[in-house]
């Protein structure tokens, strides 16, 4: 019975989205309010009914049967709801309608035409995704006869970081849909001069960007802790699919700062707002159509691919045609000096877009080569390292002093005076670090210099007397500095050791001696595991920690997973993975020494806080404007 | 003059769309990996049978007619998805199918087949995954098409979908 209500609610969402689409063409605020609220409520209902079905393990639903089991822990019963293709579509729709609701909240008499046009586009996007869900991936599909128990949930996805990763990421993607709709509305209205469209777009872009950042970071944390490969970023097509919109969102939000201030670069910002969301949808297409394989691929179903691609085509063709026909009136000839705040932002913008294009090429290149020549090739880390690092390095250099420049034009001597302390600071810190650690590598030195360049510039900005710098910007940029520190440390100085160990064997990695004390069998809620007990000694033979990596077996899905055990401090992670083995021949054990990893997560969190502050600041600004 | 430049993103987008449509439409499968076993004789193996009381001996089973070999397990979700197609091979096309039961539980498999239907004419048990290694199995489900001379003509990794179902049928007609 309950699932029928869920299904009905899903159809109701389609109805309300359609009515919103048509009503928004007329200026009837009362009717539009009903549609917006109806859409929100119906999508909430269908979402929570599916969640409820997962919680009570209602196996009459195919979706629950395929992805759940009575023995699954409660947290994962809840998150398992969006851990599969069909359920995740409901989450997507819900987030979409929540944003839809907030856009409507900004509707006033004097801007109703603009907001309604935005809502019209937003409704069109909602219709597209709801129809997609109903036609190709309805989570309320029944299964007869009702099975006694479910097939279980892929245990590799049973991880707290991954449980909240999709909602955060979706806020990011869907936030970009709001920017897209605002962009389209701006282009299609003729009375654009009266509406500061950029001030409407900015909070949405910053929200999207902030949540994309933390969503991507959580995905990395999951990969680091759960996959047991010692790394946190693999240039997997799906990681790229989230990274590309992030790059464009970064470019867009910086452009919006210039637009707000100088009213120039409006065309560019509008184009970015369209492309950023299109890339999110193309990412969805890549992941869910099955045209490429990756850790994330959901069930392969060609009809889904065709549907999403057609939908992307409609959205993209409409928006980009509009851009082609209408964007000229937003164009201006206000060129500006390179040595100015806007000049530095523009340069960064271009570099971000180039990185994005590079990553895009790397992602689809193997597909194209295969389709055209039938050869299998793979594009991996070496490609990205050798292309992305050289492009992003100047971007980071500029990021260090860009905020210090004044608008319009900066005196070159003055700027040198401003950045001199941080050049000094960066030089001293870097020299000190390398004198101490004596591990030289060109990329390593470059990374450390860049990290401290950003950190010092932003720290000095905090202590400047004249405080026109935005706090949220300083915090976020500081976060980026810390992030670079972590990325450099963990990728340049990572040490790996794979060895076979028997009980009471010992081995060394860096300055640590590791002793395998014993291996226990333990039992978890829905798995059994072998757990290694490793004692870690430092140079002075003191026990620092006890590491307990597990090799888990989940009988329901018949999967093995490895749970890495990690000892973290501010300088390094010690990472141990227990592989296959037995008492007689010993066990395969992998050790990683990963310097500075923690700073990646700290950096991402700091960026996130900066973003949150900025969201509230920009919302306040918008409220005053309204 | 300005206006022309604004068409560039549109053109790029169309180009990318065309590429994606082409990728979707071509008979291309991301899970198709080149197999060293293609056009070679089936590997020899012996195994206990799940449904018969005698041993499964590969040399006696292959080489008389076209056979499909399907690696499956009850714990593998894609296997459940493809099962309806495997059944259609046996019911609609009357192709002999041998299902190799990969690292599975005997009782669970019998239950599973009772519930979903058994399209397999025999089910050798691959308890420890040895047979799968011999066959170069990359990850189940995997399906092999073997001609009447006992030579592997096609290998598909991943669940059989409508597209693959049709493709295999065309191949069967060809080698007949």
Image (spheres, grey):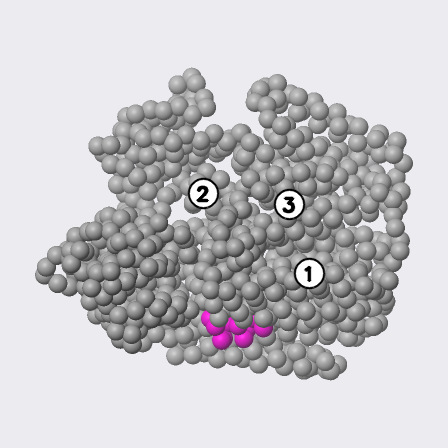
* Residues indicated by labels 1 and 2 sit on the same polypeptide chain: no
Residue A100 image-quadrant placement: bottom right
Q: Is residue A115 visible?
A: no
Q: Which residue is mark 3?
A: A607
Q: Which mark is residue A225?
A: 2
Q: Nearer the viewer, residue A40 or A564?
A: A564
Marks 1 and 2, how far apart in space? 39 Å
Query: Reading the chain from its start, which is encountered first: label 2 or label 3?
Result: 2
Q: Position of residue B40 (x, y in %)?
A: 30, 53
Q: Position of residue B111 (x, y in %)?
A: 21, 66
Question: Which chain's residue wears label 2?
Answer: A
Q: Nearer the viewer, residue A616 or A61?
A: A61
Identify the residue shown where x is 71% and y is 24%: A427
Q: Of discs 1 and 2, which sits in the foreground?
A: 1
Q: Is residue A385 above or below residue A11?
A: above
Q: Quadrant of the N terminus of chain A?
A: bottom left
Identify the residue shown where x is 79% and y is 43%: A344
Chief secondary structure of the magenta span? helix
Q: Which residue is mark 1?
A: B12
Instruction: Please provide the residue range marked out in magenta.
Output: A128-137
Residue B76 image-quadrant placement: bottom left
């Amino acid at each position: 019975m309950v699932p029928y209500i869920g299904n009905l609610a899903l159809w109701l969402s389609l109805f309300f989205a359609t009515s919103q689409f048509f009503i928004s063409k007329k200026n009837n605020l009362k009717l539009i309010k009903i549609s917006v609220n109806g859409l929100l409520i119906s999508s909430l209902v269908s979402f929570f009914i599916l969640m409820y079905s997962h919680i009570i393990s209602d196996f009459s639903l195919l979706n629950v049967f395929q992805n759940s089991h009575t023995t699954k822990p409660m947290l994962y019963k809840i998150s398992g709801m969006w851990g599969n293709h069909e359920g995740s579509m409901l989450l997507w729709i819900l987030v979409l309608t929540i944003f839809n609701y907030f856009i409507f909240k900004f509707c006033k008499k004097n801007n109703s035409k603009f907001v309604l046009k935005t809502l019209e586009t937003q409704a069109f996007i909602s219709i597209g995704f709801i129809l997609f869900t109903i036609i190709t991936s309805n989570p309320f599909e029944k299964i007869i006869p009702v099975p006694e128990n479910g097939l279980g949930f892929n245990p590799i996805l049973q991880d707290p970081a991954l449980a909240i990763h999709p909602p955060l990421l979706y806020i990011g993607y869907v936030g970009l849909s709001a920017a897209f709709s605002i962009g389209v509305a701006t282009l299609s209205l003729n009375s654009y001069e009266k509406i500061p469209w950029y001030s409407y777009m900015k909070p949405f872009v910053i929200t999207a960007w902030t949540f994309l950042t933390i969503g991507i970071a959580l995905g990395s944390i999951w990969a680091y802790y759960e996959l047991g490969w010692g790394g946190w970023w693999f240039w997997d097509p799906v990681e790229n699919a989230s990274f590309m919109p992030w790059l464009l969102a970064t470019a867009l939000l910086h452009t919006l700062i210039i637009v707000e201030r100088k009213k120039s670069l409006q065309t560019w910002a509008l184009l970015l707002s369209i492309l950023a969301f299109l890339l999110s949808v193309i990412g969805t297409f890549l992941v869910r159509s099955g045209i490429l394989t990756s850790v994330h691929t959901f069930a392969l179903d060609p009809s889904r691919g065709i549907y999403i691609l057609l939908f992307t085509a409609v959205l993209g063709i409409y928006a980009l045609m509009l851009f082609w026909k209408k964007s000229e009136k937003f164009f201006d000839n206000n060129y500006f000096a390179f040595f100015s705040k806007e000049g530095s932002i523009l340069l960064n913008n271009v570099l971000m877009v180039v990185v994005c294009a590079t990553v895009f090429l790397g992602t689809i290149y193997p597909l194209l080569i295969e389709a055209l020549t039938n050869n299998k090739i793979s594009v991996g880390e070496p490609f990205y390292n050798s292309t992305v690092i050289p492009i992003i390095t100047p971007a980071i250099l500029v990021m260090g002093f860009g905020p210090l420049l004044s608008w319009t034009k900066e005196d070159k001597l003055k700027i040198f005076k401003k950045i001199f302390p941080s050049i000094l600071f960066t030089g001293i810190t870097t020299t000190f670090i390398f004198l101490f650690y004596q591990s030289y590598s060109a990329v390593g030195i470059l990374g450390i210099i860049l990290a401290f360049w950003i950190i010092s510039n932003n720290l000095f900005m905090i202590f400047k007397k004249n405080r026109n710098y935005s706090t949220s910007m300083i915090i976020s940029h500081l976060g980026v500095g810390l992030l670079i520190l972590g990325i450099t440390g963990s990728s340049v100085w990572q040490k790996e050791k794979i060895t076979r160990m028997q009980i009471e064997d010992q081995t060394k990695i860096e300055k640590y001696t590791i002793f395998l004390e014993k291996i226990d069998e333990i039992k978890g809620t829905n798995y059994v595991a072998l757990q290694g007990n490793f004692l870690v000694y430092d140079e002075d033979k003191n026990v620092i920690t006890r590491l307990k990596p597990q090799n888990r077996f989940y009988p329901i899905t018949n999967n093995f997973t490895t749970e890495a055990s990690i000892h973290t401090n501010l300088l390094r992670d010690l990472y141990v993975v227990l592989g296959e083995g037995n008492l007689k021949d010993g066990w395969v054990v992998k050790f990683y020494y990963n310097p500075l990893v923690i700073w990646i997560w700290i950096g991402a969190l700091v960026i996130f806080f900066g973003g949150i502050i900025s969201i509230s600041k920009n919302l306040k600004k918008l409220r005053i404007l309204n | 003059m300005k206006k022309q430049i604004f068409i560039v993103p549109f053109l790029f987008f169309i180009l990318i769309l065309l590429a994606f449509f082409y990728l979707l439409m071509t008979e291309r499968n991301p899970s198709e990996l080149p197999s060293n076993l293609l056009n070679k004789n089936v590997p020899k193996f012996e195994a206990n049978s799940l449904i018969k009381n005698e041993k499964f001996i590969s040399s006696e089973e292959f080489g008389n007619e076209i056979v499909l070999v399907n690696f499956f397990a009850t714990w593998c979700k894609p296997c459940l998805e493809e099962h309806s197609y495997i059944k259609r091979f046996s019911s609609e096309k009357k192709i002999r199918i041998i299902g190799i039961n990969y690292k599975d539980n005997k009782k669970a498999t019998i239950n599973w087949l009772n519930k979903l239907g058994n399209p397999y004419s025999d089910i050798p048990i691959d308890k420890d995954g040895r047979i799968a290694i011999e066959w170069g199995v990359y990850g189940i489900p995997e399906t092999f098409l073997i001609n009447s001379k006992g030579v592997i003509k096609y290998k598909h990794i991943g669940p059989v979908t409508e597209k693959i179902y049709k493709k295999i049928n065309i191949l069967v007609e060809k080698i007949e």
